[in-house]
Amino acid sequence: MALLQPQIPFRLGIISDTHGLLRPEAVTALQGSGALIHAGDVGNPYILSQLRSIAPVFAVRGNVDTEPWASVLPLTEVVELHGNSIYVLHNLDKLDLNPAASGFRIVISGHTHKPESQMHDGVLYINPGSAGPRRFSLPICLAHLDLLKTPWHVEFHQLAVS
């Protein structure tokens, strides 16, 4: 008789719209992630190098990433993790494909600074919110997703900042 081994959680850290500011609270919140996705508006290459010290990073270019260093960042990224196809772009309004028809299970975007998640046609859409400078009255936030625990539940983490 074979014993079933529990699956080890795979925590995906999701961050966006840092706009050149990587808060220590964000670094702490992302610790323990198996991989990180930055959904654009990075603002400074230092942020990506800091995130790489935590876990492998997949990042896309946002509308404020106009400096020469950002030209190496793609506008969209396809990430395959634990059997899940993830499509990453900065602005969801620029989505130019049908994720469900294209085989994607998850779409990650930023741009609006509003943390939200929703299922649509079997695809999980996630916007982690903004982890950078405060905009309007929106929370300073990032997200986590355990890719191996279904049904998926996105955990939003508001960062306590002074």
Image (cartoon, rainbow, N blue to C red):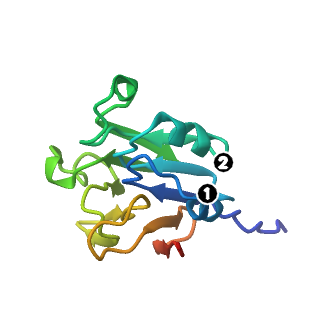
- In this rendering, position of residue 48 left or right of residue 89: right
Residue 27 position, x and y percent, is 61, 57
Residue 153 location in percent, x, y? 47, 75
Q: What is the C-alpha distance between the residues marked 2 and 1?
A: 8 Å
Judge by depth and name the residue closer to the eye, 24 or 9. 24
Answer yes or no: do the residues labelled 2 and 1 have beta carbons within 8 Å? yes
Residue in the picture at 65% in, 62% down:
28
Residue at image point 15% right, 43% down: 96
x, y percent for residue 6: 73, 68
Amino acid type indicated by mark 1? Val
For label 2, count other residues whose C-alpha is less than 10 Å away and answer few (under 14), some (14-19) or many (20+). some
Q: Residue at x 67, y 42 (%)?
A: 53
Name the image quarter holding residue 75: top left
Q: Secondary structure at mark 2?
A: loop
Q: Say which element carries label 1.
A: helix
Tell me if residue 83 can be seen: no
Q: Is residue 6 left or right of residue 139?
A: right
Near-viewer residue (26 or 15): 26
Count of labels shown?
A: 2
Q: Residues within 10 Å of mark 1 (few under 14, many from 20)?
A: some
Check the image and report above or below for 71 versus 13. above
Is 90 situated above or below 143? above
Q: Amino acid at mark 2?
A: Ile
Q: Nearest to the eye among marks 2 and 1: give it.
A: 1
Q: Quadrant of residue 64 in the image?
A: top left
Location of mark 1 (residue): 27
Residue 47 drawn at (x, y percent): 52, 43
In the rendered image, the quadrant that contains the N terminus is bottom right
Query: Which residue has dot 2 on it?
Result: 54
